[in-house]
Amino acid sequence: MADSPLDDLQATLHREIPISAQMGITVAGYDAGRLTLQMPLAPNRNHKRTAFAGSLNALCTVTGWCLVYLLSRERQEFGDVVIRRSSIKFLQPVDGDVITATTEQLDPALLDYFAEMLLEKGQAKLDLRVEVPGIDGPAVCFAGSYVVLESRLLDGVGE
Amino acid sequence: MADSPLDDLQATLHREIPISAQMGITVAGYDAGRLTLQMPLAPNRNHKRTAFAGSLNALCTVTGWCLVYLLSRERQEFGDVVIRRSSIKFLQPVDGDVITATTEQLDPALLDYFAEMLLEKGQAKLDLRVEVPGIDGPAVCFAGSYVVLESRLLDGVGE
């Protein structure tokens, strides 16, 4: 029986980014275009028993990466996904036993443009936001700029 | 025999942020006000055998954190160091076996102001830059905004 796209994504994540398994990052759900990943606090804690900023940043980074990976696979495009830049704000300490990060709802017009570029040019860029929920609002706000590149184009990244 | 400040920092880092030990992050040197941390590629690789963006972000985050920690201890202030926000640019793939991140040289006037605020207000903010070197220029540029707070003030963070 074929794996579901989320099972495939989960296996891909731990195979391609091994430290994500050490952090306990798993795919929690994909609903109405919004992808949620989660990780336990325990291995990602700091001395104040809240989440380490670097782990929160990594969780948000891979949540965005996974969404772009899913979106490109849904369109039968199998290029590599890389992140070009990101920014993050830590608004509240994060102290739940399980920490979730969810991508924002994307504008359908942006998604259409992403798919069009991927098909026509073999590469496409997607800017997206990821949030870790807190009390009465986000605890962490992350924005990342990702690109999908066909493997033949990938050697040029960053040059 | 008392530990050196860098030995103390190294022990503090792995005790207070356990995932930094899983990533293999260690304190590599502190020279002329510039602090260098390093990590091996192997546990932090992605499927392309270059460094995972989330690990690079975590390395830069803790490098800045460690510098602010050192600076506050040098001034006999023992508040908690937290990061408020950061941004990062990934300019080149990072594929060395050992990856280093170094803080920029800080303006002495900024450092004086940091020390003054810490002494007078019990809290101080420091914006700093961290770089991972690449070929003919930085591979990764990180900017973080950190604060040091006396423990009695810390409950207010993020509220």
Image (cartoon, coloured by chain):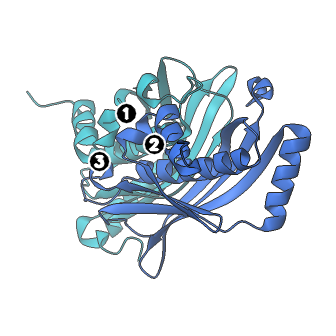
Chain colours: A blue, B cyan
Looking at the image, residue B11 sits to the left or right of residue B27; the answer is left
Amino acid at circle 2? Ala
Looking at the image, residue B15 sits to the left or right of residue A41; the answer is left
Dot 3: what SS?
Answer: helix
Mark 2 or 1: the one toward you: 1
Residue found at x 73% / y 35%: A79
- Mark 2–mark 1 Cα distance, whole angstroms, equals 9 Å
Whether pointer 2 and pointer 1 mark residues with C-beta atoms closer than 8 Å, the reply is: yes
Mark 3 or 2: the one toward you: 3
Placement of A86 over or under B22, stated as above or below: below
Earlier in the chain: of badge 2 and badge 1, it is 1
Amino acid at circle 1? Met
For disc 2, the chain is: B
Dot 1: what SS?
Answer: loop
- Mark 1–mark 3 Cα distance, whole angstroms, equals 12 Å
- Mark 3–mark 2 Cα distance, whole angstroms, equals 14 Å
Residue B72: x, y in percent? 32, 50
**Residue A43 badge:** 3
Badge 1 is on which residue? B23
Dot 2: what SS?
Answer: helix
